[in-house]
C-alpha cells in the first residue's frame, strides 16, 4: 500500500511529473488541438472528466483482476473500459451540449487513443494507490494536462501573428515551445516532497 | 468480395439468423455477425494471451529472483546464499516460502561457511522526481549498514542520479553506523544528511553537491527504515542463525 | 484494389521515407519522445511497435471480410491489445532491465495512433501480402525514426552510443538532451530538417516547371 499524502500526489501529478511535459503522454491532442485557446480548454476539461471516470473504473477492475488472479487481462480490460467511457461521454455531450460537441469534433473519439488516460490507469495500479489517492491522482493529472494544453495554446495564438521562418511553421514550432515549457516545468521538481 | 463472403457463410454452417439476413439483402449487418466476430476474436485473443503468459511466467519469475539475488549479494559483501524471512510480530521472523502481497520481507545472507553475514532490507521513499526504491544490507557484527543499491529511481539524469554512481557518496554506505541505544529499542543516532565534506560522525551521510535533495532523500529513507527494522532484527537475531 | 498500379515493394518503401510515420505523418509521438533517451531503448521500443504493427496488419487484413464494419474499431483494439500483452510478457522474459527502462510505455503501444491508423486505413482494405509489406515498411520506418532520435539524444546527452563511450572524459554532457525537454527539441530539429528538404525539393520542381513553361512560351 502506498502511503503518499494526497496533496503530494496532486502536486506531483499536475506539476512535477506533468503528463504531457514530463511523461510525454497525450502528445497527439496536445499538438492537434493546441492552436486555439478555448478549444484547448474544452479539450482539457473533457480529458479530465474521462480521466476521472476511467480512473475509478480502473480501480474497480484492478480489484477484480487481483481477486480472480488474472493479471494478464489488465491491458485489455483497461482499454475496453476507457473506450466505453469515451463513448458514454460522447453521447452525453452530444445530447446536452451540441455546441461543445461540434467544437470538440473528431477529438472526442480520439480520446480513446489518448495515451494519457491509459497511462493514468496503468500508473495508478503500478503505484498501488488506494481509492481516494486514485481520484486525486486522476484530478491532478487532468489539471496538469489542461494546464499544459492551455499554456501552449496561448503561446501558439500569439505566434500566429509573428514572422517565423517558413520551415518552422506548424509542428516543429509547437514542439520547440513544448520543449521550453518542459524545461520550465522542471523547476517544479522537489515541490511534492 | 461478395461471392467470397457468401461462400464463407455457407461453409460455416450458415445458421438461420445469418441465412435470413442474407436472403433479406446484405446490409445492415446482423447482430449474429457482430457477436460471431467479437466473440470469435475475443476467444482467440484470450487463448493467445493465456498461453504466452503460461510460457513466459517461469522465465520472468526466474529473472526477477535472479535480479533480487544479485542485489542481495551486492549489498551484503561476502554472502553467497540467501533466505527470505517474513516479519511475524510479535514472535519474530519466520522463513517465508510463498510471497503473499503485503508481507514484510527481509533477506538474510550467508557466507560459504553458512555463517550469517547480514540482512538485506528493501526500503522506499519520495525522491526529487518520484519514488526511490532501494535495498540495503545490515550487518550485526558492525552494527552498520554495509551496502546499498538503488533499485528504481527517476532522479534527474546527470544530477540526482549520481546517488547511484558518485564514488564519494557510495563510500558513506560501506559502513554507516546504525548502533542502538542501551535499551535496544531505537537508533542511538539518527542517520542524518550533511553537506559534502562535512561528515564527522559515522552515522552522517556525506551529501552530493548539486544533488542535495536526492542525497537527503536517501538518508531519510534509510533512517526511517533502519529505525523500524534494526531494533526488531537485533532482538530476534537468533531467528536468522537457526537456519542452515 | 486490383487496378492499383502500386507494386508491393512500393507499399514497403513508402513507410521508410516518403510517408515516414514519425517525420512526415507525425503519428505515435508519445513513445517516440518518452523512450528515446538512449539508442538501445529507442531500438527496443521501435522493434516492439513494429512487431505489433505487422501482426495486427496481418490479422486485420485476414479477417477483413469476417469483421462487420459496425464493430471493427472494437475488434481492432482487441487484436492490438492482445499482441501488446504478448510483447509485454516476452520483453519481461528476455530482459528485466530493458523492461524497467521502457516501463509502462510497452503497454501504451496499444494507444499508438499509428497502429490503429494503419489497421483502419490500410489493412482493412487490402490483401494480406500488401498489408504485411505496409506493416513492415511503416514498422521499420518507425523504428528507424526512433533510432535517429535515440542516437542523437544519447550522443549529445551522455556522450555514448549503445552504451559505448564515444568521447574523451573532457566532453561535457548536454544533460538537457536526456531530460524530457531534450526529446521535444530533438524531434523539432528532425522535423525542421525534413521540412527544409521538402521545401528545397518543391522549389527546385517549381523553378524547373517555370523554365519549362518559359521555353514552351518561346
Image (tube, coloured by chain):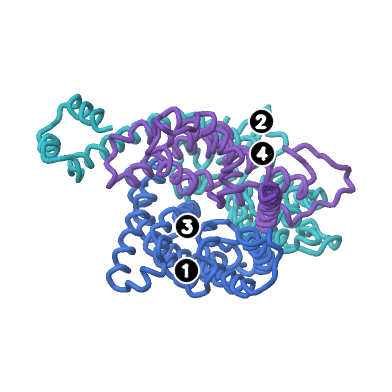
Give the residue number, with chain letter if any, for mark 4: C40
Q: Looking at the image, which residue is at 56% across and 43% down? A: C19
Give the residue number, with chain letter if any, for mark 1: A44
Q: Chain of mark 4?
A: C
Q: Chain of mark 1?
A: A
Relative to B3, residue A113 above or below:
below
Q: Chain of mark 3?
A: A
Relative to A175, residue C138 above or below:
above
Relative to B135, residue B241 above or below:
above
Give the residue number, with chain letter if any, for mark 3: A120
Label 3 vs 1, first from the N-terminus: 1
Q: Residues within 10 Å of mark 4 (few under 14, many from 20)?
A: many
Of badges 1 and 4, the one in the foreground is 1
Depth order, front residue of C148/B227:
C148
Q: Looking at the image, which residue is at 21% across and 26% down? A: B7
Depth order, front residue of A167/A191:
A167
Using the numbered discs, state the Cα–Cα distance from disc 3 to disc 1 in whole angstroms. Answer: 15 Å
The color chain B is rendered in? cyan
In what element is the residue under mark 2?
Answer: loop
Residue B155 visible: no
Of badges 1 and 2, the one in the foreground is 1
Choose top left, top right, bottom left or bottom right for residue C183.
Answer: bottom right
Q: Chain of mark 2?
A: B
The color chain A is rendered in? blue
Using the numbered discs, state the Cα–Cα distance from disc 4 to disc 2 in whole angstroms. Answer: 32 Å
Callout 3 touching callout 1 (CB < 8 Å): no
Q: Is residue C167 left or right of residue A54?
A: right
Q: Looking at the image, which residue is at 33% across and 33% down? A: C63
Q: Residues within 10 Å of mark 2 (few under 14, many from 20)?
A: some
Using the numbered discs, state the Cα–Cα distance from disc 1 to disc 2 in whole angstroms. Answer: 54 Å
Of badges 2 and 3, the one in the foreground is 3
Amino acid at each position: 500500500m502506498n502511503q503518499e499524502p494526497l496533496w503530494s500526489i496532486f502536486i506531483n501529478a499536475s506539476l512535477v511529473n506533468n503528463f504531457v511535459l514530463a511523461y510525454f503522454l497525450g502528445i497527439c491532442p496536445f499538438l492537434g488541438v493546441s492552436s486555439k485557446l478555448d478549444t484547448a480548454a474544452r479539450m482539457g476539461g473533457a480529458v479530465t472528466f474521462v480521466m476521472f471516470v476511467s480512473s475509478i473504473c480502473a480501480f474497480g477492475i484492478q480489484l477484480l483482476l487481483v481477486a480472480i488472479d488474472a493479471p494478464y487481462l489488465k491491458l485489455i480490460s483497461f482499454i475496453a473500459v476507457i473506450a466505453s467511457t469515451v463513448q458514454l461521454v460522447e453521447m452525453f455531450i452530444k445530447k446536452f451540449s451540441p455546441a461543445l460537441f461540434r467544437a470538440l469534433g473528431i477529438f472526442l473519439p480520439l480520446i480513446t487513443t489518448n495515451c494519457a488516460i491509459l497511462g493514468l490507469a496503468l500508473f495508478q495500479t503500478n503505484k498501488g494507490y488506494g481509492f481516494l489517492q486514485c481520484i486525486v491522482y486522476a484530478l491532478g493529472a487532468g489539471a496538469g494536462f489542461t494546464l499544459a494544453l492551455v499554456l501552449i495554446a496561448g503561446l501558439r495564438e500569439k505566434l500566429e501573428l509573428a514572422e517565423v521562418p517558413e520551415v518552422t511553421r506548424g509542428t516543429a514550432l509547437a514542439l520547440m515551445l513544448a520543449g521550453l515549457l518542459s524545461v520550465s516545468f522542471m523547476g517544479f521538481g522537489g515541490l511534492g516532497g | 468480395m461478395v461471392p467470397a463472403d457468401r461462400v464463407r457463410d455457407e461453409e460455416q454452417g450458415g445458421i438461420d439468423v445469418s441465412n435470413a439476413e442474407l436472403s433479406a439483402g446484405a446490409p445492415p449487418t446482423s447482430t449474429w455477425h457482430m457477436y460471431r466476430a467479437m466473440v470469435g476474436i475475443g476467444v482467440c485473443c484470450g487463448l493467445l494471451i493465456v498461453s504466452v503468459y503460461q510460457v513466459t511466467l517461469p522465465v520472468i519469475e526466474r529473472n526477477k529472483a535472479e535480479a533480487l539475488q544479485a542485489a542481495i549479494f551486492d549489498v551484503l559483501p561476502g554472502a553467497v546464499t540467501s533466505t527470505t524471512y517474513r516479519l511475524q510480530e510479535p514472535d519474530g521472523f519466520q522463513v517465508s516460502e510463498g510471497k503473499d502481497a503485503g508481507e514484510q520481507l527481509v533477506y538474510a545472507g550467508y557466507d560459504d561457511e553458512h555463517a550469517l553475514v547480514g540482512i538485506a532490507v528493501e526500503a522506499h521513499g519520495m525522491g526529487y522526481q518520484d519514488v526511490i526504491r532501494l535495498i540495503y544490507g545490515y550487518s550485526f557484527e558492525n552494527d552498520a549498514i554495509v551496502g546499498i543499491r538503488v533499485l528504481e529511481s527517476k532522479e534527474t539524469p546527470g544530477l540526482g542520479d549520481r546517488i547511484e554512481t558518485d564514488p564519494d557518496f557510495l563510500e558513506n554506505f560501506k559502513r554507516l553506523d546504525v548502533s542502538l541505544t542501551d535499551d535496544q529499542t531505537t537508533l542511538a543516532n539518527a542517520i542524518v544528511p550533511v553537506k559534502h565534506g562535512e561528515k564527522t560522525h559515522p552515522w552522517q551521510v556525506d551529501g552530493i553537491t548539486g544533488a542535495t535533495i536526492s542525497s537527503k532523500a536517501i538518508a531519510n529513507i534509510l533512517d526511517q527504515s533502519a529505525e523500524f527494522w534494526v531494533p526488531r532484527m537485533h532482538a530476534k537475531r537468533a531467528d536468522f542463525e537457526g537456519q542452515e | 484494389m486490383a487496378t492499383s498500379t502500386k507494386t508491393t515493394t512500393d507499399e514497403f518503401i513508402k513507410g521508410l521515407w516518403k510517408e515516414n510515420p514519425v517525420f512526415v505523418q507525425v503519428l505515435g509521438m508519445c513513445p517516440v519522445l518518452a523512450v528515446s533517451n538512449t539508442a538501445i531503448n529507442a531500438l527496443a521500443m521501435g522493434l516492439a511497435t513494429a512487431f505489433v504493427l505487422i501482426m495486427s496488419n496481418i490479422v486485420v487484413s485476414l479477417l477483413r471480410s469476417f469483421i462487420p464494419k459496425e464493430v471493427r474499431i472494437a475488434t481492432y483494439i482487441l487484436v492490438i491489445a492482445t499482441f501488446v500483452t504478448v510483447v509485454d510478457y516476452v520483453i519481461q522474459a528476455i530482459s528485466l532491465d530493458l523492461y524497467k527502462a521502457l516501463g509502462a510505455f510497452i503497454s501504451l503501444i496499444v494507444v499508438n495512433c499509428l497502429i490503429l491508423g494503419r489497421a483502419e486505413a490500410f489493412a482493412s482494405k487490402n490483401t494480406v501480402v500488401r498489408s504485411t509489406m505496409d506493416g513492415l515498411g511503416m514498422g521499420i520506418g518507425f523504428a528507424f525514426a526512433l533510432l535517429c532520435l535515440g542516437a542523437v539524444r544519447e550522443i549529445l546527452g551522455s556522450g555514448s552510443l549503445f552504451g559505448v563511450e564515444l568521447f574523451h572524459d573532457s566532453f561535457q554532457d548536454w544533460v538537457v538532451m536526456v531530460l524530457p525537454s531534450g526529446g521535444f527539441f530533438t524531434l523539432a530539429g528532425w522535423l525542421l530538417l525534413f521540412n527544409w528538404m521538402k521545401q528545397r525539393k518543391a522549389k527546385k520542381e517549381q523553378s524547373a516547371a517555370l523554365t519549362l513553361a518559359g521555353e514552351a512560351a518561346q
